[in-house]
Amino acid sequence: MKYSDQVAATLKTLHPDVRKSIRRALADLEAGKKGDTKPLQPPLQGFSRLRVGKYRVIYRQDTEAQELIAEYLESRATVYEAFSTRSQDEPRKGKLNRGLRG
């Protein structure tokens, strides 16, 4: 699992219990446990979302690298609009980080 800069930065701002829940859900997803996931519709086709409480992680499967990439993390209230705007402005330009610890 790789995390975008945005996901890594947002995780650092969250309460430790919330951060732990999100990291656990991402690890489970990477291990093949589906969790509360859903493929997104256009204009975000090709991405899926993982629901963890009031937060949503937008992710995609990198088929070449056979790896999941967590692209965006935000609360439900703003995640889809914010990611849609970001993905249209800067499609996949952010640096990716290996799964973070701590």
Image (spheres, rainbow, N blue to C red):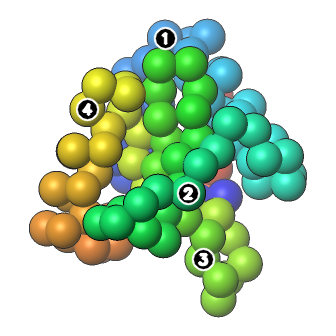
Pointers 3 and 2 in contact (C-beta within 8 Å): no
Q: Nearer the viewer, mark 3 or mark 4?
A: 4
Kind of residue at disc 3: Asp
Question: For residue 68, what is the image quadrant?
Answer: bottom right
Question: Along the polypeptide, which appears first: circle 2 or circle 1?
Answer: 1
**Residue at horizontal 85%, vertical 54%?**
32
The residue identified by callout 4 is 78
Q: Residues within 10 Å of mark 3 (few under 14, many from 20)?
A: few
Identified by mark 4, the residue type is: Thr
Using the rendered view, name the quadrant where residue 27 is placed: top right
Q: Looking at the image, tell me whether mark 4 or mark 1 is earlier in sequence order.
A: 1
Q: Is residue 19 visible?
A: yes
Say which residue label 3 marks. 62
Marks 2,1: beta carbons within 8 A: no
> Residue under circle 2?
39
Q: Seen in the image, is 99 located left or right of residue 91? A: right
Q: Quadrant of the N terminus?
A: bottom right
Disc ID at residue 43:
none
User: Which quadrant is home to the C terminus?
Assistant: top right
**Which residue matches tag 1?**
15
Q: Amino acid at mark 2?
A: Pro
Residue 55 image position (x, y, % from top left):
47, 26
Amino acid residing under circle 1: His
